[in-house]
Image: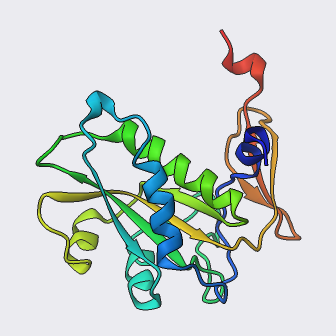
Amino acid sequence: MNLQHLVLKNRSYRRYDESFSIERNQVLSWIDLARNTPSARNFQPLKFFVSTEPKTNETIFNNISWAGYLENGRPVQGERPTAYIVICNDMDIAQQSEYDQGIVAQTILLTAVSEGLGGCMFTSVKKESMRTQLELPKNLEPQMVVAIGKPIENVVITDVENSDIRYYRDESGTHFVPKRSMAEIVI
């Protein structure tokens, strides 16, 4: 797949085939690639907690908020991701890592898409609860979660109408994501 195809296929999927398992080593290979991306001031403050185990996945699932624009956006049992990466900032290295988080998350997701998978990034994270439940050291602050699985939903990019950027699903369950036009974003 070329880069354009990967970027257009990399959507925020919210429903997955939960019977499809992902191996921990596969996730580690994505992180290994992502660790080679640029880092602000080359601090490299990110640490990664990986889960491919159902019990730990459930803990992470319960500590993130799903699809705020959808009335029933939270995936039901059987439609949840089968792998998670909790991206943590090592506060002993740097106080902020927003740019690094975005770069590594996008790299991980593009790699997952190239392997027939999909995912979603979450920054709405119950940080302290997650840190406690996953038994993370105090210096590691959960910042973002990347959920990954085998998508079972159709996601379509559409144009923004009447300045409404909220994603939505139609009666058949197709997920639409409005995007601003080039005329709106280029100044």
Identify which residue, 14 or 160, lies in the foreground: 14
Q: Which residue does the image show at 73% across and 65% down from the upper left? A: 116
Percent coordinates x, y for residue 127 in the rendering: 27, 63
Identify which residue, 69 or 47, lies in the foreground: 47
In the displayed structure image, the side of residue 60 where residue 41 appears, left or right: left
Q: Which residue does the image show at 35% across and 35% down from the upper left? A: 39
Q: Is residue 24 placed above or below 110 in the rendered structure?
A: below
Percent coordinates x, y for residue 104 in the rendering: 45, 47
Q: Is residue 57 placed above or below 37 in the rendered structure?
A: below
Q: Which residue does the image show at 76% across and 74% down from the upper left? A: 152
Q: Which residue does the image show at 28% across and 71% down from the upper left? A: 130
- What is the image's colouring? rainbow
Q: Is residue 139 placed above or below 25 in the rendered structure?
A: above
Percent coordinates x, y for residue 53 in the rendering: 44, 87
Percent coordinates x, y for residue 121 in the rendering: 51, 56
In the displayed structure image, the side of residue 162 where residue 15 appears, left or right: left
In the displayed structure image, the side of residue 143 where residue 122 appears, left or right: right
Q: Is residue 93 placed above or below 62 in the rendered structure?
A: above
Please identify the quarter of the rendering in which residue 57 is found. bottom left
Q: How many marks?
A: 0
Residue lying furthest top: 187
